[in-house]
Image: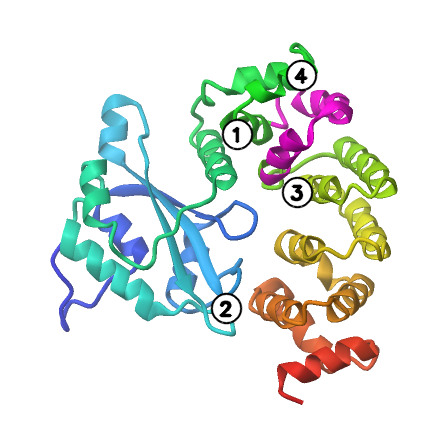
Amino acid sequence: MSNATPNNPVPTLADLMEHANAQWRVFDLGRRIQSISKQEFAAVEANDKPYPYPIQQKARFALLFWDQNQAKADGMKNPFIWFLQFDVDELGMLKLQQRDHYISLVIKELGGALAGDTEQQADKLNNHPYSFTPDQNRQAAFNARVKVALKQPASMYYEHAQAYFNGHLGTDKWQELTVQGIADFASRIDVKDNQTALIKALDDLTVQTLSVLGATLEHYTIGVALTEKLIEQQKVAISTSDHEQVFHLLRCMAGSESKALVLQQLKHLLSCHDIDEESLFLIIAGRFWSYLNDQELLHVFFDRVAQHPNQQLFPGIFADLVAIPETRQTMLNLLRDPNRSTAVSRAIGTLFGR
């Protein structure tokens, strides 16, 4: 692969993968960890459509790839991972000059040898502004997701976590759990009765365990029974003003297949005016954004945000949500909605300096 010239323009990331004879996948890492199809990613790179899940005006994703010839030879997929972030504009479109700059750095340093030595790659590509390091919980959740996607065994910590949630270890043994083990359990919540085990274990989980569980389970689909148990636990936490537990349990519900139950519970949470921490609003915007297309929830949510003491909360959340394709039109409609509250109208006015 030669360097880009005026007659040989900078290719796309997809082109890099194809020219390197690599198998590859893309996962969003900004909101909930979820895959982005090659077709959709190609459309994003062509600026034919906005990035599907931007967060805080950034596209934050992982590009996972491996040498398909090597995989065939030894029967193992040993993927390389680039954690990348690029700015998006107010429409959610990728700012391609940043992507182009990154690709030019890759071509300059690695040429076509994308799937070469890992340490060599790290040394040559560690000095650019487009990388990011996921936090420990997200890193573990992503590692677990990759293992499932590539049909590889879970980490060595999975069985211990599974034994704990199944009640085979004492409840006081929670300190022996690892973040990766909990993430592996969450990624396999739909197998080997894991969901049933978690329902039974929820009553006895420490806040530390629940914190990691919420940060990893939010990326996976859970069933109705587990959703109902989480809501039950959340109502108990509300009654005792344990807001930290409320938020951890809420994150656990992000991937629930029971949309009606979750919508009802979101409305209930927003009706609890003593829960006024920023975390509530940031979790809803960051993990439950699609629910805000419900008009009733939308109005209650933004009325609470507009009245929050932190006056930067409203413009920040509005800017975040208006860049998401799924909620953009809803946000634009809110600007001229005659049914919005006085507080929301006032907050919108500040967006435009009125």
Q: Amino acid at mark 1?
A: Val
Pointer 1 or 2: first along the chain: 2
Q: Amino acid at mark 2?
A: Gly
Task: Tell which tag, 4 or 1, sits nearer the viewer.
Answer: 4
Is residue 262 left or right of 209 when viewed as pictured?
right
Q: Determine if the magenta segment contains residue 198.
A: yes
Which residue is the site of mark 3? 255
Identify whether 161 is placed above or below 284. Answer: above
Task: Tell which tag, 1 or 3, sits nearer the viewer.
Answer: 1
Q: Disc 4 to disc 3, how far (Cα)?
A: 28 Å
Q: Amino acid at mark 4?
A: Asp
Local SS, label 4: helix
Task: Tell which tag, 2 or 4, sits nearer the viewer.
Answer: 4
Q: Position of residue 160 (x, y in %)?
A: 55, 15
Q: Disc 4 to disc 1, how far (Cα)?
A: 16 Å
Q: Amino acid at mark 3?
A: Gly
Q: Disc 2 to disc 4, how far (Cα)?
A: 46 Å
Pointer 2 or 4: first along the chain: 2
Corner quadrant of residue 207:
top right
Q: Disc 1 to disc 3, how far (Cα)?
A: 19 Å
Corner quadrant of residue 25:
top left
Q: Nearer the viewer, residue 72 or 132?
A: 132
Which residue is the site of mark 4? 172
Pointer 4 or 1: first along the chain: 4
Rendered-image quadrant of the C terminus = bottom right
Which residue is the site of mark 2? 92
